[in-house]
Amino acid sequence: MNVSHNLPPTHIDELHFIAADLYDTDLIEIMACAVKQAATGEYPIGRVLVRRGAPPAKDLKALADECVRISEVFIPTLPRLLMKFIADQGKVANLTQIPMHFQLDLYPNARLGLYLDELMQTLERIVDQHTDDEILKNVATIVHYLGTNLWVAQQTEASRLRLIDGVALQLRHGLERFMQMDEDERLDEEDEAALLASYKKMTAFYS
């Protein structure tokens, strides 16, 4: 199985400047799929027959090398891409799949800690702005994955706690508002939507 895929940095640079919205969307979706395929060796359904059993050692080495390359390209650029497209649900849903394939050891070894802080700040912004189930699940998965590396977990602990505490605080305020209402009162549409959004966010991080 050929698991080697090139992800030219020029494609990343292109995302910062292209103006056509449809092209942005298509390129980001293709890029997210290419990253997953390169990092896992999984081809899209229907493209090839899946070989049964564990991959040979040479394939595992190739996959590990691809994860390093993906990380080198996307660790510095992904926070900016997420911020650029933060208002677009589809783009954010695709882009938030990419950190799950990062080689976390590169953060301390390659002195990329600054980009780790950037990523966490961006994830906080995403959770604040979005209520889409897929996006929230992706962010929760990223946060959990970052915690699997001791150095990364230590560096992101404050941001992680701030993110989760913020979600919990929103839910608590919504519930307090509901509990203080008289029997004949009803939540207006805005308060009801805010309470539901807070519940969805909390569920994503504790499911």
Image: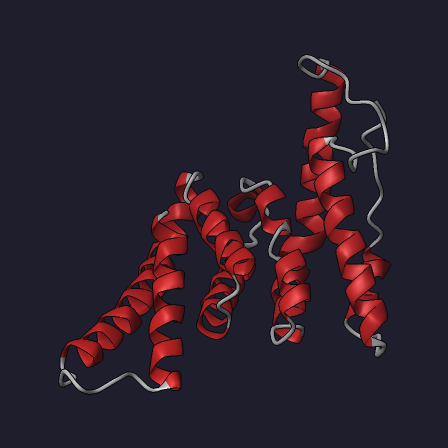
Q: Up-down: is 118 above or below 192?
A: above
Rendering coords of residue 4 (x, y %): 83, 33
Name the image quarter holding residue 159. bottom left
Rendering coords of residue 115 (x, y %): 56, 60
The image's colour scheme reads secondary structure
* The N terminus lies in quadrant: top right
- Left or right: 164, with 77 as reference point: left
Rendering coords of residue 104 (x, y %): 54, 42
Q: Residue at 44%, 39% (x, y): give it.
A: 149
Q: Up-down: is 113 above or below 82?
A: above
Front position in the image: 195 or 144: 195
- Left or right: 134, with 56 as reference point: left
Residue 113 visible in the snapshot: no
Q: Up-down: is 2 above or below 199?
A: above
Total marks placed? 0
Rendering coords of residue 89 (x, y %): 62, 68
Residue 171 visible in the snapshot: yes
Front position in the image: 50 or 124: 50
- Left or right: 188, with 74 as reference point: left
Q: Residue at 82%, 60% (x, y): give it.
A: 27
Q: Residue at 68%, 30% (x, y): give it.
A: 64
